[in-house]
Image: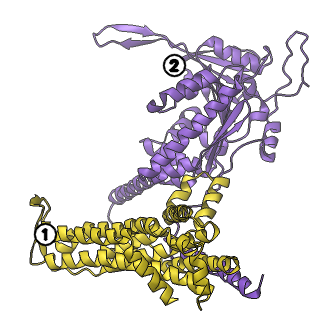
């Protein structure tokens, strides 16, 4: 299973998508490191310059001043990373199942479920690496500039990987029914957007008039992973704010178990499919 | 399907169910919405039916002399008889509202706004205890009809200085205001004569009208000297604590200024609006809107429904929780050539709005009692 995952990672590194992502993240970090000047005096952010322009901010404690930045980084890592992951990883599963390749893989002394699980783990590893590189790089950058080392940004990256796990499980399972990168990406976006809506369900449900419509919406959003709730938790953790969710561990476990359930459905399909 | 494959399927189902349960527990808890038990008045309930039958105290009305087929003759309710056949008439069951939770709150506000107790003042001057003797108040195009137990009322004492009186019909007394002289700012004097009139009937009704003719017409209808072809309100419509017919023009006046288009459409499409309000617990309002053109009425209903939805979303966006809660309980139900608008006002919301009246009044009474006690102590000579 791990060999399958490693093989997938090797293949991904050869692809332009991921090379481009790595270059883009590095470019952003380098640009910020060169252009961002922050004057921190006794733990207070006295002045900020970005590309030479002075930002007019009140003098305040550096962790308070940077809170909006941490929120933004967590949000971009979460949502931006998920969107990029859906687009970039959509064709891994269809490629795995392509004629010629699948027969070769099935001929190896690897169980079918291990092939699928290995592909899944490989994609997760990529997602985790990208999220940690981006959020970790920024945490180091801001730490060097301000003396404030906020490792909570890495937690935001981990949460985004858990969320993407649920989305990719659905994409992988969809590819087993329709071997198409487009269908896989469409299902991924469908689960992603439904997950965002599901996270806000308690705010949206009262907007429906009581009746069949409200019941349908309640039932629909009940089953999807609470992606926006996790994103909100990631931002709260990054900004050192109290969490709005009742239990983050339960939510995380739920999203992971949901992803595992969808993947198991895919394994069930893969086991009976005749190639 | 082999057992191994079935195992995967069952695992998938169990994992999905477990995932949903864990996410349900972990997510932000749903806001607690207070339960609203609204009774929307849609038809006569048994108690209202008994009330309607008990009010048939007048003999049957005379029938018009024509060949049209008529229904069975039966005794009449004097208030409904007096209403006639105008465009609008709304009846308020004052006694029923007085004893409802809403009525108690309203009463506290009425008393709170007055320096002196107006109810006690009226009882002193006219011998009428509004809280005990008043039954119904009917508002019509022509005037106001008040029913109740006015056997102990001293109308002559109340009006002798201010009005002339005369008997009319079988049991009515009509009071017409005397002309009064008014001082003008420039020092001159002018005589003013009010047109309105008041009549009392049989110790159980008081009628106020725009003129003597109006009041006499009401008395004629009650005493059976004139027949009404199409009464504005019939007894099967007497359900709820407030009920009646409102013309489209009158209803259009209550629309907010930014809904002028909707108000104009109401005027042109709606023919009559039948309104019923229940105040037994939370306040439930049902308005049945009827028009001639089915398509236009349906369209109007949809427009009103859309306006309510937009207002609800706007209130949620502006974080106006009470308004959003109110609009959440509003519905439009189309039904052929008519549609019903249902609205509810939770009692809790009314309590929040009106409870301050009662608190202020209780504080004033506390202060007054303390003052009286202090005065009493000061008056008692020291031994």
Which of the 4 image quarters holds residue B207?
top right
Location of the C terminus of chain A by quadrant is: bottom right
Which of the 4 image quarters holds residue A113?
bottom right
Cβ–Cβ under 8 Å for marks 1 and 2:
no
Q: Is residue B342 above or below residue B225?
A: below
Q: Is residue B55 above or below residue A75?
A: above
- Which percent across, then down, holds residue A170? 56, 71
Q: How many marks?
A: 2
Q: CA distance from mark 1 to mark 2?
A: 93 Å
Q: Which hue is chain B drawn in?
A: purple
Disc 1 versus disc 2: nearer the observer: 1
Q: Is A108 positioned to the left or the right of A126 in the image?
A: right
Q: Secondary structure at mark 1?
A: helix
Mark 1 Cα-neighbour bin, 10 Å: few <14, some 14–19, many ≥20: few
Q: Is A206 positioned to the left or the right of B63 in the image?
A: left
Q: Which residue is mark 2?
A: B162
Residue B303 visible, this angle: yes
Residue at 47% x, 33% y: name it.
B256
Residue at 22% x, 81% y: name it.
A149
Q: Which hue is chain A drawn in?
A: yellow
Mark 2 Cα-neighbour bin, 10 Å: few <14, some 14–19, many ≥20: some
Residue A159 visible, this angle: no
The chain under label 1 reads A
Q: Is residue B351 above or below residue B110?
A: below
Residue at 58% x, 47% y: name it.
B103
Q: Secondary structure at mark 2?
A: loop
Q: Is residue B185 above or below residue B312?
A: above
Q: Which residue is mark 1?
A: A34
- Which percent across, then down, holds residue B219? 72, 18
- Which percent across, then down, holds residue B123? 56, 38
The chain under label 2 reads B
Which of the 4 image quarters holds residue B56?
top right
């Amino acid at each position: 299973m791990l060999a399958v995952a490693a093989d997938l990672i090797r293949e991904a590194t050869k692809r332009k998508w991921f090379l481009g992502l790595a270059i883009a993240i590095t470019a952003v970090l380098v640009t910020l490191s060169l252009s961002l000047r922050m004057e921190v005096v006794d733990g207070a952010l006295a002045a900020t310059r970005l590309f030479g322009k002075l930002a007019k901010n009140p003098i305040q404690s550096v962790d308070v001043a940077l809170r909006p930045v941490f929120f933004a980084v967590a949000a971009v890592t979460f949502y931006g990373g998920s969107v990029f992951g859906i687009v970039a990883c959509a064709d891994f599963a269809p490629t795995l199942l392509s004629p010629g390749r699948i027969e070769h893989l099935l001929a190896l002394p690897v169980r079918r479920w291990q092939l699928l699980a290995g592909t899944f783990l490989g994609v997760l590893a990529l997602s985790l690496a990208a999220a940690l590189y981006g959020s970790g790089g920024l945490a180091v950058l801001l730490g060097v500039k301000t003396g404030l080392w906020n490792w909570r940004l890495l937690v935001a990256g981990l949460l985004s990987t858990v969320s993407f796990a649920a989305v990719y499980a659905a994409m992988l399972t969809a590819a087993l029914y329709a071997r198409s990168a487009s269908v896989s990406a469409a299902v991924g976006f469908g689960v992603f957007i439904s997950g965002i809506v599901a996270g806000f369900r308690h705010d949206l449900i009262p907007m429906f008039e009581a009746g069949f419509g409200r019941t349908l919406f309640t039932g629909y959003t009940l089953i999807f992973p609470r992606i926006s709730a996790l994103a909100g938790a990631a931002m709260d953790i990054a900004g050192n704010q109290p969490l709005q969710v009742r239990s983050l561990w339960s939510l995380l476990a739920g999203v992971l178990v949901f992803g595992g359930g969808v993947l198991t459905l895919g394994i069930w399909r893969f086991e009976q499919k005749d190639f | 399907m082999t057992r191994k494959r079935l195992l995967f399927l069952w695992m998938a189902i169990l994992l999905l169910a477990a995932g949903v349960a864990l996410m349900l527990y972990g997510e932000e808890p749903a806001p607690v919405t207070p339960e609203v038990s609204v009774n929307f008045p849609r038809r006569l309930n048994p108690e209202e039916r008994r009330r309607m039958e008990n009010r048939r105290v007048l003999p049957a009305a005379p029938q018009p002399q024509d060949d049209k087929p008529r229904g069975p003759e039966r005794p009449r309710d004097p208030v409904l008889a007096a209403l006639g056949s105008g465009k609008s008439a709304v009846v308020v069951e004052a006694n029923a509202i007085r004893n409802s939770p809403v009525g108690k709150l309203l009463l506290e506000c009425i008393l709170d706004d007055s320096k002196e107790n107006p109810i006690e003042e009226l009882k002193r001057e006219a011998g009428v205890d509004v809280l005990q003797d008043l039954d119904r108040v009917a508002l019509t195009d022509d005037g106001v009809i008040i029913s109740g137990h006015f056997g102990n009322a001293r109308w002559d004492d109340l009006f002798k200085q201010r009005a002339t009186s005369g008997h009319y019909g079988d049991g009515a007394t009509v009071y017409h205001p005397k002309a009064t002289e008014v001082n003008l700012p420039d020092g001159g004097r002018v005589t003013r004569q009010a047109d309105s009139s008041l009549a009392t009937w049989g110790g159980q009704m008081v009628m106020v009208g725009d003129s003597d003719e109006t009041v006499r017409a009401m008395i004629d209808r009650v005493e059976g000297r004139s027949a009404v072809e199409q009464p504005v309100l019939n007894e099967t419509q007497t359900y709820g604590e407030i009920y009646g017919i409102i013309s489209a023009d009158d209803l259009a006046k209550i629309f907010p200024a930014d809904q002028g288009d909707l108000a104009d459409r109401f005027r042109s499409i709606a023919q009559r609006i039948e309104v019923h309000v229940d105040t037994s617990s939370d306040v439930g309002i049902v308005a049945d809107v009827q028009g001639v053109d089915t398509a236009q009425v349906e369209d109007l209903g949809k427009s009103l429904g859309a306006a309510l939805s937009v207002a609800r979303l706007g209130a949620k966006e502006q974080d106006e929780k009470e308004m959003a809660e109110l609009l959440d309980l509003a519905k439009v139900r189309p039904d052929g050539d008519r549609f019903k608008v249902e609205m509810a006002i939770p009692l809790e919301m009314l309590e929040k709005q009106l409870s301050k009246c009662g608190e202020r009044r209780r504080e004033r009474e506390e202060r007054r009692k303390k003052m009286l006690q202090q005065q009493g102590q000061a008056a008692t000579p020291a031994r």
